[in-house]
Every structure is written in C-alpha cells, then in structure tokens.
Amino acid sequence: MADWGRTTLELLVQELQAPVRLDESFDRRVMVRVRRLYAERRPRGVAGWIAAAVNVTRRPAYAAALAAGVVAIATVGMLRSRPTSVAISGPIPVQFVLVAPEARSVAVVGDFNNWGLGDTALVAENHNGVWSVSAPVPAGVHRYAFLVNGEKWVADPTAPRAAGDDFGQPSSALVVEATAE
Amino acid sequence: MRSRSARGFLIVALLGAAFGSVQAQDPRIGNRLDAPTRKALSALVDSAKAQGIPVEPLIEKVYQGLAMGADGPRIVTAVRSLTIEMANAQRELGTVATADELKAAASAVHAGVPPVELGKMKKQSGLRRSLTLPFTVLADIVSRGVPVGAAANAIRSLVGAGARDRDISEFQRNVQVDIEKGAQPQAAVETRAKGAVTTTPAARPEKREQE
C-alpha cells in the first residue's frame, strides 16, 4: 500500500514537473492581448496621468514606497537646511597672539572659557614680547579679549571687533568653523 | 553635537544655580550678584526661553560683565539689550537661524544694522549658507565707521556672489588695514568688496568665458 502510494505520488509529481510544450507563438499572442486590454482601459492624456497616479496610491506597496520617499526627501532637506547639525562641532585648536613687549602677563578670556571666572583664563607665554597661547575652542562665534597685567583689557588687533562695548572695554569676535566629516 | 548638548545642559544648570531661588550658586558668580540683579536676570532668561531665544549668549554676557567689573544694573542692561537684539534678529531670520547666527546677528543689530537687512541676506543666501561670519564682519566694519548702508551692500554682494567665509575674512582684514592706514571707511569697503566679488567662485567661470 505504501509502495503503491509512493509510486503513484512519484508519477503525479513527475507529471506535474514535466514542462508543458506550448505553441511557439503563444507568448507573443498573450502579450499582444494584454497590451490591447491595457490600452483600452487606460484613459489618455491628463486623465490617464491622473488615473495612473491614483492607481499608485491604491496599491499598498507603491503607496508605502511613495511615503518613504517623501519622508526621506523631507529628512534630507531638513538636515541640509541646518549646516551646524551635520557638521562635527568639536573644539578646534586656535592660537591667540598679542604683541606686547612691555607686558608682564597676558591672559586670554572669552565666551569659550567663561571669561576667566573660576581660574579658567588662558595664560599666554612670552616670546620676546610676542605673547601666545593655543587652546581648543568649540565651533561657533565667541567674544574674547586679552587681559594685560591682570588689569588692562585689549582687543585682538588682528580680529574683527565685537560690536558694542557694553562694559566700557574692547573685545573681539572669533568665528570657529565646525569641521565637516 | 554631544558636547553641545552637554554644554547646553550645563548652562541650564548654571542658570538655575546662578539666577534661581536655589541657594546653591555657581562658584564663578559667587556672591558677586545681588538679589535684585539675580531676579532681573532670571526674568530676562525666562523671557528669552519663552521666545525660543538661546540663553547661552545671555549667560556669557553675564560672565563678561563680571569679569570686566561691571555692576549689577549695568549687567542687566547689557543682557536686556542682547535679549531684544536677538529677538529682533530672530524675527527677521526665522526659526532656521542657528544660535550662532542669532548671536552674530545680534552683534550686527547692536552695531546699528537694521534687522530687516539681515533678513534680506538670509533670504538671498538660502538656508544652507551660514551667515555667522558675514554678520560678524558686518558688525566689525560698521563699528569701524563704515555707513550701515554701504556695509550691508558690501556684505550682501559678497554673499550673493558666493563668497566663502575665508574670502569674507580676507575682505575684513583688508578693510581693517586700509582704514588703519587712513583710508576713508566707505571707500575702503566699496573698493575691497568690488575686488573680492571678482575672485569669488561664482565669478571665476565668467572670467574664464570672457578669456
């Protein structure tokens, strides 16, 4: 019984697996018929275009792909519209230099070190009257100034002025560009 | 971005410590601010937050005032001015402006540039171009005596011609040197702007075509 069943099953499988021989013109005839049917049903001109668009939205797969595309384009657009959000804004080394041959000490204070409050001032080194210090500064725009001898405020003569000496002392502006990665 | 977020968090924490009713104070501020000053600053910060204005520049202004030995009322006046200037700038630049752009724009407004001029530049330059440096240079050249109209025209022409930040920095240095050598500020700006525009990337292809 088992043998009969297996043999019969094998025969059926063999029969089903055997390639069906069709007339050589079969494929061509089918495709001609399909194209004709499609052409008859599809409205022409603007109506056809609209119908095609509606058709897309009626198919879940196309609609999902369309929605994903819109979201992707919108996301890329939003990211591109904010340059700082796609740039790496880690601290970037900046050298501050002041020529002050008569100075006894020079420090750099600004937005990037809370204006030296809490002993955060950058102390410059003296190289025969050329005072300099390098420090990592976060990307962005900063106000800063040199503090000479711990009492005299001096703007950086090589940098743009920070507009408005609100406190009666000069200061400079520094723009540190974020490095894109 | 992470460091920026951390910094923002720190600023908010410091604001609470410095201006709030909490007794714990920022050691950098200590007892240097009296109670009325703290109250006034706290109100300004709350107002800025409510308007969506970044508060970091405000606290930096407080630090600057303290470092420069300013008294409480003067610090409050400076912070109030900055809040108003940033609000005016934000109104013209829109919400697409970054915190740095707003800070630089506030400097330009402080120097005397009408906020509407800054808005025009932002519209002209598009969303992707950061105007932090152009606004900073605009504030600088106005503070050096260049009439606002001439300064705004120069920066607008540079930005419109596709000048990069390094081109605009070079323009600023040249104008500064010219003025320090005795040039009339407006003449220096107009002359240097004309030269800088011809060397921008946008101008180069035209030059090649003419050749």
Image: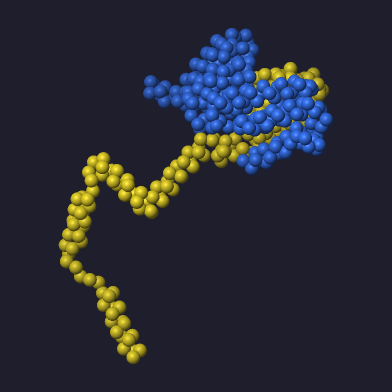
- Chain with colour blue in the figure: B
Q: Quadrant of residue B104?
A: top right
Viewer-proximal residue among A180 and A112:
A112
The answer to whether A139 is drawn above or below residue B153 in the figure is below
Q: Is residue B51 left or right of residue A30?
A: right
Q: Quadrant of residue B74?
A: top right
Q: Quadrant of the C terminus of chain B?
A: top left
Decide if residue A109 is in sight here: no
Image coordinates of residue A151 in percent, x first then y, are: 81, 21
Which residue is rendered at x = 67% and y = 22% of the image?
B81
Image coordinates of residue B31 in percent, x first then y, are: 83, 30
The answer to whether A78 is drawn above or below residue A23 in the figure is above
Which residue is rendered at x = 53% and y = 20% of the image?
B116
- Chain with colour yellow in the figure: A
Q: Residue furthest bottom?
A: A1
Which residue is rendered at x = 70% and y = 22% of the image?
B78
The answer to whether A14 is drawn above or below residue B28 in the figure is below
Viewer-proximal residue among B18 and A10:
B18
